[in-house]
Amino acid sequence: MPKVLTGPVEIIGAGLLGTSIALALRKAGIEVWLSDINSEHVRTASGLGAGIARPAQKRPQLAVVAVPPAHLAQSIVEALEDGAYVTDVGSVKAGPLAAVADQVEERALARYVGSHPMAGNERSGPLAATAALFEGRPWAITQHVHADPMAVALVEDLVAICGGEPVRMTPVEHDRTVARTSHLPHLLAVLVAGQLTDAEPSHLVLSGQGVRDVTRVAAGDPDLYGQILLANAPVVGEVLREVRAELDRAMVALDAGDGDVLDEILTRGNEGRSSLLIKHGVALDEVGPLFVLVPDGPGELARLLRDVGESGVNLEDLRIDHDPARPVGLVELTIATSAIETLATSLNERGWTTHR
Amino acid sequence: MPKVLTGPVEIIGAGLLGTSIALALRKAGIEVWLSDINSEHVRTASGLGAGIARPAQKRPQLAVVAVPPAHLAQSIVEALEDGAYVTDVGSVKAGPLAAVADQVEERALARYVGSHPMAGNERSGPLAATAALFEGRPWAITQHVHADPMAVALVEDLVAICGGEPVRMTPVEHDRTVARTSHLPHLLAVLVAGQLTDAEPSHLVLSGQGVRDVTRVAAGDPDLYGQILLANAPVVGEVLREVRAELDRAMVALDAGDGDVLDEILTRGNEGRSSLLIKHGVALDEVGPLFVLVPDGPGELARLLRDVGESGVNLEDLRIDHDPARPVGLVELTIATSAIETLATSLNERGWTTHR
């Protein structure tokens, strides 16, 4: 599989992402050196078999920068000055590239190609690392116009070794996309969650699955997300201005009782949601839900899934509905629409209570 | 279980909620009459065993109004003029109550007590109905100051027969709560989803589980949610003004590179999210995730759940991560923190790849 990436690879920042990449490289037999301002991270990662502390006076073939957003550009510059090819796994691409371009010559800049694997933002630290973290995940490769083809090839090999699915786009395209698919959803989820602090706690029992879904990402680390939002501030600001205009439109429509404008806004939401519901090229509107009541105890869900498995139906998704007040669980199975009737009959015969 | 509710009960509006209530009442042996402006709904519900078409010249003991938000007040007024005790299952309480109070005498108003079961907003129609729909679900009972104790007792019996968990609050408290737990999350999810229509479709492969979670409710019926938002417009408007002020603060902070303000906003989001994470009084921070790689095929998930079940660990939640580009599935198991190590070891021994 690897063509040009033979190692050694230096991992700069032995956190969750860096150590996971190191483990995948080691699994492929490639020599890995570890660096981190926190020497305990290096010891932990090394103990997990992720490589050895970087030896002095030696230069890696490729350096992978996996440090927090605020330190990205400086670490990339230092790695380039060291003479190696360099990539990074930061979640914002254009700003760090511009900062690096300001500080190094074009010849050095050519050895840098940024990338961004879609994995692992919720946990942190080397102990959470695994070689399987990137298996099948999209991994953006964002080469700039002056990139050396060798640098691109090395990053492509890295993604392949980690089991990622390469997605090619420019740094600007990347940042515009993640502003909408990650930074905006995060900030709005935070605003929704923040409003809950003003509610009477005992009344929050009325919360359903909807608000739980919307606010899940709001549990993320404020420090990390603050850095990410600031790193992409100009693009996020642009998207927020558009959202603010829509919010104002909705507020005016609510005040005026204007159902047509609300309908237009809500319908556009339907369209945006549909654009996400594609899996392996199959539109998810070809699947639908079947609800099953499940007693809350060990083994019950396994018994249900065994019964689903024996029916030969492939489960697209499964959700356990968490209502604080409920003694029994409601499980939502998502399956091909054509199989719902069959599965319902089969489960009913085995004693389950189902509904659509 | 029932003390005063002996029937007959008239269900006005034989959609998902109305027909589900009817089925639960029939199961308890109570006579049910069905009314709907769409006579086909009455035939369908009747065919499901949910009761009979309302006989002429007869009066029910209790009428349950289960019509769309825009028609609630008028249907409640007509049912009160008919002489029965009346409840409704609408998702907004203060506005309809005020409209009803404007149109009937205080003596008639005393026979009305509003309610709101937390169930069933995503599906619709009598065919989706089930007697189990409300099993263990919170069900708000929102009596007004002039309510007849008999009307309250009848609604309490109704909730008990349906298996719901009664939650008592005033109509205004109810509407303030759902503005934050339902209407605001819905509208902001819609704005996030709407922005995705401006993204290059091929770049949406970078979407992760976060944006999928945030936008799930944006798939809801625009007509229904438009009516709900308008019915609670004054309260939703108030909450939106607060959110808009926070959004402006975030935008200014982003422009100014002010990490402290962002941190304050993001930290408040953490707090709001935590206030939701309670189940049967157990704080969900006592549980944590274990990730398992699962091949995408029939029976694989069942095999995993069987193995989990045999370990004796009680699953709090399970999520299947849908990355469009991924050939294998990543399943997130949520279990008691104390059991994560044990379960990981047990699953690894059975050949599963896990990580934390």
Image: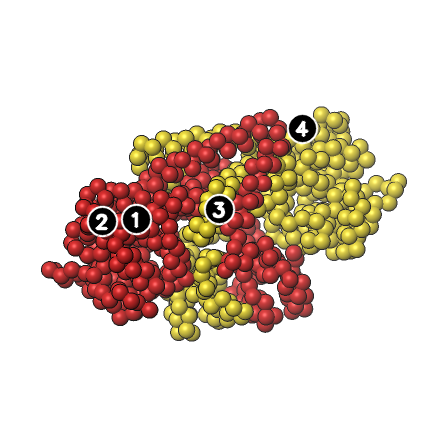
Chain colours: A yellow, B red
Relative horizontal placement of residue B13, taking residue A268 as reference (left or right): left
Residue extending furthest toward the right: A57
Counting other residues with Cα less than 10 Å from the Cα at mark 1, is it few (<14), some (14-19), or many (20 or more)? some
Q: CA distance from mark 1 to mark 4?
A: 62 Å
Q: Label 1, on which residue?
A: B144
Q: Nearer the viewer, mark 1 or mark 4?
A: 1
Residue A3 pos. (x, y %): 73, 48
The label shown at residue A214 is 3
Tell me the chain of label 1.
B
Q: Secondary structure at mark 2?
A: helix
Q: Do circles 1 and 2 both sit on a common chain?
A: yes
Q: Label 4, on which residue?
A: A98
Q: Do circles 4 and 2 both sit on a common chain?
A: no
Residue A138 pos. (x, y %): 60, 47
Q: Label 2, on which residue?
A: B109
Q: Secondary structure at mark 3?
A: helix
Relative to B211, is B250 above or below? above
Tell me the chain of label 2.
B
Residue B126 pos. (x, y %): 29, 59
Q: Do circles 1 and 4 both sit on a common chain?
A: no
- Three-letter amino acid code of the residue under disc 1: His
